[in-house]
Amino acid sequence: MRIDIISLFPDMFTGPLGHSILKRAQDNNLIFVQVTNPRDFTYDKHHIVDDYPFGGGSGMVMKPEPIFRAVENVVNAANSSNRRVVLMCPGGQPFNQAKARELASYEQLVLVCGHYEGIDDRIRQQVVDEAVSIGDYVLTGGELPAMIITDAVARMIPGVLGANDGAQHDSFYNGFLEYPQYTRPREFNGWEVPEVLLSGDHAKIETWRRKESLRATFVRRPDLLEGVELSPRDQKLLQEVKSEQAGG
Ligand code: 4FV
């Protein structure tokens, strides 16, 4: 998968893209990530990329031409019709695991990062396929959202998380929160590891994990259970959880 990021601050991405799983994914050519600076597509002496807002008001707005040319450049470079151009903005669709999985299905993802007061709205209207928001708060730029989306999407690419591809057990992967995880030592500060996990009984362990995933979801994110069609097995496990949580 190719991920093109359009940003005035390419150096901001060195850290997140230069370590651990994302670095290995690039080294193994599972993903190709490139940051393109719209300023490189300005031909005036001062390489202007922003200007005062029409109609007045505070702050500066990013000009449409440099961004248009930058997007055009990476689209032509990839020459793939299977692409998605996404604008990071607070007014976009909420980003979640389902969106991450959907965006991971494209050959090329172009993530457009605004800065200052935002980008001339003709880019949102005419150039991008969709706008995505990572949350109902305002950031100084779209760079952090682009890093978050790059990370979440990359994890969905086969092989990025390694052979056994742990994404299947992710929180939200099946719509529920993940079951709790433990590792050595068996006892720490007097805090024990649930006995079942040391039993070697994989069927029992799988049932315990299913039940604890339902418990975590019921206790911490009950909204995720609303309207979900549970299997008879999950209904039984959830009933046990509810009575246990009620002190039964
Ligand atoms: C944002 C968000 C966000 C708004 C103006 C960048 C800033 C500036 N992007 N989810 N929340 N963007 O706050 O995606 O251009």
Image (cartoon, rainbow, N blue to C red):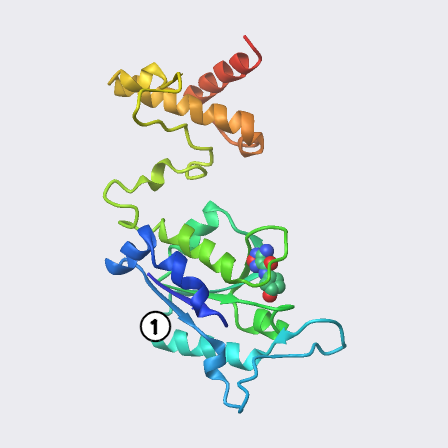
Q: What residue is rendered at 46% in x and 16% in y?
A: 236
Q: What residue is rendered at 52% in x and 68% in y?
A: 128
Q: Amino acid at mark 1?
A: Ala
Looking at the rendered structure, the secondary structure element under dot 1 is helix
Q: Would you call the spot at circle 1 few (<14 residues within 10 Å), some (14-19), or many (20 or more)?
A: some
Quick check: which quadrant has ligand 1? Answer: bottom right
**Taking 194 as reference, is 136 left or right?**
right
Say which quadrant the N terminus sits in: bottom left
Which residue, given by chain and number where applicable, does mark 1 sit on?
Answer: 78
What x and y, as percent, mark residue 2? 34, 64
Say which quadrant the C terminus sits in: top right
What x and y, as percent, mark residue 101? 41, 49
Q: Nearer the viewer, residue 159 or 114?
A: 114
Q: Residue furthest top?
A: 248
Question: Splitting the image into 4 quarters, where does residue 192 fall?
Answer: top left
Q: Nearer the viewer, residue 183 or 138?
A: 183
Q: Nearer the viewer, residue 51 or 218?
A: 51
**Taking 165 as reference, is 149 left or right?**
right
Question: Splitting the image into 4 quarters, where does residue 107 fall?
Answer: bottom left
What count of labels does the image hold?
A: 1
Q: Residue furthest front?
A: 189
